[in-house]
Amino acid sequence: MNKISLNNQILLGVVSGGMLGFWLAELGQESEISQSGLYVAKLIGSLFTDLLRMVLIPLVFTSIVVGVANLRSHRQMNRVWQATLVFFMSTMLFAIALGLTAANILQPGGGLQIAMFQDAIQSFQATQMSIADFFAQFLRSLFQNPIAALAQGNVLAVVIFALLLGIALVIGGERYRNILALMQEFLELILMLVGWIMHLAPLGIMALVLQLVVTQDAGLLSTLINFVGIVIGTTLLHGLVVLPLILFLMTGMTPIRFWLGAREALITAFATSSSAATLPVTLRCAEQHLHVKRDVAGFVIPVGATMNMDGTALYEAVAALFVANLVGIELSLSQQLIVFMTAMLAAVGAPGIPSAGMVTMVVVLQSVGLPVEAIAILLPIDRLLDTFRTTVNVEGDLVGSLVVQHWTQNAEPNAQD
Ligand code: ASP
């Protein structure tokens, strides 16, 4: 029994969760078995994500401080953050371009009209927010009292504070080696906890997948099948072809080797729909399975989990064109360019939690004068679409860590480390 590896146990969890989910869905919502099954699955699934979130903040904090502090020389540090930003920005732009191209060719929402969804729209309270407000709010969320940020689980503010502290440790040098050693040991302990939590992953993931299957609205999904198909198709194209190709061309790593090393994180992202909750697993995969050095992974992965979202960027662009088709507006080239830029902003600004992209979508729709209320149509099917985009978001972070490691190593032939 002990022979089944954790990875296979997780796969087993996905399959059995899916099968049980279909069985319960078949029994119908009224059935008592179905209700109690869903209740238990919700409890187990939430406990698993709670455990991941429990270690998230200390892990982000220590891994960034240690990661940055270990990138000892200024030149090396500059290279890593520059390479990281270039990689994140270019892959997100590519994802948006892919989404926009597919949406222009395949025209999601053709044949549907917004009036068909009037009920949903009327009961939806839309929040309006201009790009300037969104940007200002984003900037203001970066710098926070670190204790408040740690306590509230504000990942982005923790990332920023940890980055600054890491830089101070680099500049301070030898004098602060005790603090660095303390952080390093703390990080190792947290990683040990992550290892324990992973033993529960098969059960947690089984419960989350079961919930996902049972709670899908098949009727709505079939009405929006064209849009759902385009989103899932292009997201998969980005995740199965574009990112692996970039990885192969940049580092020579084959897709199979990558997926074998990354699968724990990818499946967890699929089941939880949260890049943040998946972060402990992503970091573990990067370091232990894909052999990214701790100083690179410790920086690239947490920053990526909060800012690098290829799947979300792609989704925002396709969804904006879908809404435009629904209301019968043809977006001009310059308007599509605005969608291009705001989709990027919305993806960077979305925190790594379920359906965060739906909230920041307001900015994209408003930027070209589309009705924000249309989000009400997208919300009920978001649980399903979020699984795919979160998986690709996490995949982008892992590919990023490998590419950045390769670039910075090659760029520094005399590196002493
Ligand atoms: N759920 C996504 C993530 O955590 C964000 C989104 O809603 O697009 O990466």
Image (tube, rainbow, N blue to C red):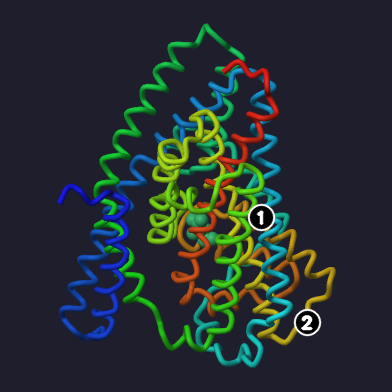
Give the x, y percent position of residue 133. 68, 55
Q: Nearer the viewer, residue 335 or 73?
A: 73
Q: From the viewer's perspective, is residue 95 above or below residue 80?
A: below
Q: Give the residue at mark 2.
A: 330
Q: Which mark is first along the chain, 2 or 1?
A: 1
Q: Nearer the viewer, residue 417 or 271?
A: 417
Q: Is residue 271 visible?
A: yes
Which amino acid type is shown beneath numbered disc 2? Glu
Q: From the viewer's perspective, is residue 159 above or below residue 170?
A: below
Q: Give the residue at mark 1.
A: 92
- Dot 2 alpha-carbon crowd within 10 angstroms: few under 14, some 14 to 19, many 20 or more: few
Instruction: Kindly report which numbered mark, 1 or 2, lies closer to the viewer in this rendering.
Output: 1
Q: From the viewer's perspective, is residue 259 above or below residue 406?
A: below
Identity of the residue drawn at 66% across and 44% down? 250
Label 2: element kind:
loop
> Dividing the picture into quarters, in which one does residue 342 lie?
bottom right
Identity of the residue drawn at 50% across and 36% down? 158
Identity of the residue drawn at 56% across and 11% down? 173
